Amino acid sequence: MTPDSIRHAYRDAAQEQVFQFFDHLSPSAQETLLHQAAAIDLAEIDHLVKTLVRASGSTSVDVAGVEPAQYVPLPRAGGDPAQWAAAKAAGESALRAGRVAAFTVAGGQGTRLGFDGPKGTFPVTPLTGKTLFQVFAEKILAASRRYGKPIPWFIMTSDINHEATVAFFEAHDHFGIEPGLIQFFSQGLMPAVTPEGKILLAAPGQIALSPDGHGGSLRALVRNGCTAKMASMGIDVVSYFQVDNPLVHCIDPAFIGFHLLHASELTSKTCLKTYAAEKVGVFVQRGGRAEVLEYSDLPATLTNATDPDGQLRFRAGSIAIHIFSRELVERMGDAKDPALRLPFHLAKKKVPTVDANGQPIEPSEPNGIKFEMFVFDALPFAKNPVIVETAREDEFSPVKNAEGNDSPKTCRDDQLRQWARWCLAAGKSIPVDSTGLPTVSFEISPLFADSGEAFAARAAEIDIQDRTILEG
Ligand code: UTP
């Protein structure tokens, strides 16, 4: 597109305010603005403004016909051990056949943590301060060694952290993973708009852009050639996890096996809610389709409803761990029909912008609307969705906030509790307090053991004391 055709397109879309300072910009700033403008799908923005922005205020979610989703319980909660064993065997065989890739979404802004740098570079382990990326790398390496096949790792970044992420891996020799097995790619960006639907400028020569949500991963995988690469490598199973949870089993054979045995296109993990008001999305079903409803969309009558045995009726919480079939990613990531793509959600935010003279404005109230896609919205589009229970203490302790809940401190403690449980189950004596938190500090690398089972197999060779560090 030429500069003129870009500006004409913006004028025709009634978005010419984007170029209001254009003539006063330096040639390189003009080029940057044109580049940003050309990457925006104006028809998509127009559609979102008409369907979402103008309708906002009357967006209560319809919950008619919503039922709790069925899930596969853990063996300790009544699940069939033979079914779990069969799933594990099926997953292991897929891993030995090299059909599985790991996929981390790491494009978020991490505002709540307030850490200066990509969130994956945040130090998270209790003693050596390994970063989130290193923990995942070691888990992926451990699995690839166990199953004798390289496991490619796709990492989605965004413009705000792409270069820093790539540089971090280079500076750490990719944590021992062959560099060719790791593919970094940036997710898409969406402009913020005013309540009237006008695209906002962050500066005279800069559109207010932000990442298009973790759901942007589906189209980013397709647009960046990742699905084509997966196909050429014989990969049809994509193990999706977020950058903030070091307890995640990046590669989980039983989880993969349930996905394959059910010929599922999307398999998700659930942790059961611990109390009704817990702020977590829940898996529900209606009309034969599974979906995730955000906690804020579930009316109190349903949030508090209980089964005859006293358990919460809507208890299957979503923890953002999924297996995607490559086909589902290809189909949804490349869909021409908006009805077959992930929907956008809007969020009212304070978006720094400029006044009519190009002077910066730091709004004290929300002045803009941002658009994001959520990856779990793929669930209703997936054939044979499956939801599998996991134990929170074994798999979910995200670092979201600087302090309080889901903070670096709670996450370090949860890692220590997990290792202490492994030790105690393997007959090692470890002093713990009433919450199971060890009163000594130690650390177990996933390369030494990445599960209680793997730890038990090596327990005889080690002695744990305060400040013991077990590496691979
Ligand atoms: P969160 O919803 O926790 O958002 O992302 P965030 O941006 O990391 O943090 P806050 O809300 O600003 O504090 C959950 C996961 O989804 C990824 C994040 O990197 C994280 O792994 N994500 C989120 C993306 O990859 N892209 C996005 O646009 C949003």
Image (cartoon, rainbow, N blue to C red):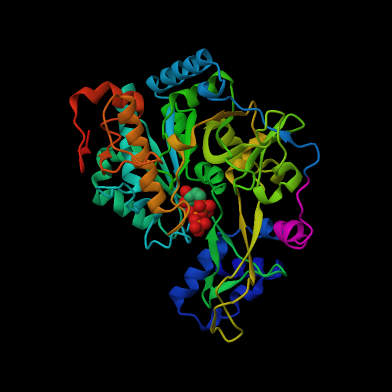
Q: Is residue 463 above or below residue 367?
A: above
Q: Is residue 20 visible?
A: yes
At a point 74% along the width and 42% down the height, the residue shown is 302
* Residue 102 location (% of width, % of height): 42, 35
* Residue 365 location (% of width, % of height): 62, 74
Q: In the image, is residue 455 part of the stretch drawn in magenta?
A: no
Q: Quadrant of the N terminus?
A: bottom right
* Residue 114 location (% of width, % of height): 43, 63
Residue closer to the observer: 125 or 33? 125
Residue closer to the observer: 384 or 196? 384
Q: Quadrant of the C terminus?
A: top left
* Residue 82 location (% of width, % of height): 51, 12
At a point 47% along the width and 15% down the height, the residue shown is 85
At a point 67% along the width and 48% down the height, the residue shown is 343
Residue closer to the observer: 43 or 311? 311
Would you identify the image quadrant in which residue 67 lies? top right
Report the magenta residues as a range. Answer: 47-62
